[in-house]
Amino acid sequence: MQKIIFPIALLLFSCTVFAQDDIKRTPWGSPDLNGYWDYHHLTPLQRPAEFEGSTVMTEEQAKDWEDNAYNREAERRGRSNPNANYVGVDLWHEEAFAEWETDDHRTSLITDPPSGRTPAMLESRREELRNRPRYRGYARGPEDRTMMERCIFAPQSVPPIQTLIENAMLQLVLTEDYAVITAERMHDSRIIPLDNRAPLPTDIKQYYGSGTGYWDGDTLVIETTGIHPSYSYQGSSPDMKVIERLTLKPDNRLYYEYTIDDPRSFEQPWTAGFHWKNHAGPTFEYACHEFNYGMTGILSGARAEEYRELTGETYDRKLVEAEYR
């Protein structure tokens, strides 16, 4: 009996070791998270009401969802004509090129609560949000253009990382002591020490917060607090704590999971997760608009509309643009 048990035990041990090492590793032994990562997804963050009670879609439902995405993309591309009255991403999204989170067509990225939706928001937080200044539509003038318009700040780079329908690429650089996550949009970088040091004092707020990291086995854990109060994710407060977990899979995908812990806003913490796909890279330059020529275009376009309304004629674009250079 002992002669039989020993080979079986040895085989099981070998399989376990193989499974643990079936991922790329750095020279110092941690999972190798270096590279470019694509995080386009069709899966919605919250479960739509039509899928209440279902964690996955049927093949027919998934096909309808995909068709709707392609139809929206086709409609947007149809706006691309010289007479269209649209600006920027009103013309172009990459939604139709996104993929499902998993082959089983999950109905939400949120995995906890089981409802697939964010937990109820506290009434006290709702009152705070009602009383804060809100963006209610297009800017009233050039002074109202946002920091993103001016290429200073992109909220999509603030943790947690959200699925996007354009510019959904990250570069992750990992050393023994730091992880650096650089977003394609605005080229914003989060520099995260991996020594589990204490975060900055709570009265110091930064646009990307104060993040510290550590390894939990083969999972990189990043805890971030101190995010600037101008940013709110799904109604979160400045007291929000974001816990991110990055786990490399044998198929060279990276599973990204995050938990929002914000007792000032929500009745309970909530968790979402999705895979990042490895990409050959590199990321292309997100040029935004150097010298703020986008503002020139917006102003000259507005003057053209005024001129057309007053005279019924077109205008000389070069003359109008020269006025604002």
Image (cartoon, grey):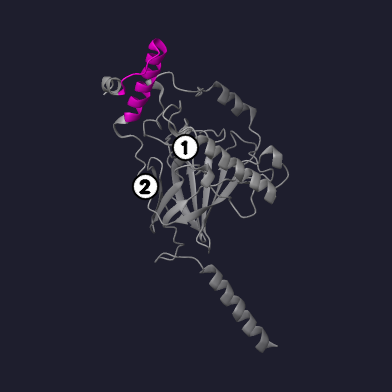
Give residue 88's position: percent from left, percent from top.
43, 32
Query: At label 2, which amino acid type do we have?
Result: Phe
Left or right, 175 with respect to 3, comes to left
Determine the main secondary structure of the stretch shown in magenta: helix
Q: Which of 234 and 2 is in front in this view?
A: 234
233 inside magenta stretch: no
Q: Nearer the viewer, residue 64 or 198?
A: 64
- Few, some or many residues within 10 Å of mark 2 (<14, 14–19, 20+): few
Q: Residue 92 carries which label?
A: 1
- Contact, CB < 8 Å: mark 2 with mark 1? no
Q: What distance separates the C-alpha of mark 2 from that of mark 1?
A: 17 Å
- Few, some or many residues within 10 Å of mark 1 (<14, 14–19, 20+): some
Q: Which mark is residue 127?
A: none
Q: Which of marks 2 and 1 is nearer the N terminus?
A: 1
Give residue 13's position: percent from left, percent from top.
59, 76
The residue identified by callout 2 is 284
Which residue lies at the image location 47% right of the left edge and 39% below the top edge? 156
Front disc: 2 or 1: 1
Left or right, 175 with respect to 114, comes to left
Range of magenta residues? 293-317
* Above-or-below relation of 283 to 148: below
Left or right, 265 with respect to 83, comes to right
Query: At label 1, which amino acid type do we have?
Result: Trp
Quadrant of res 52? top right
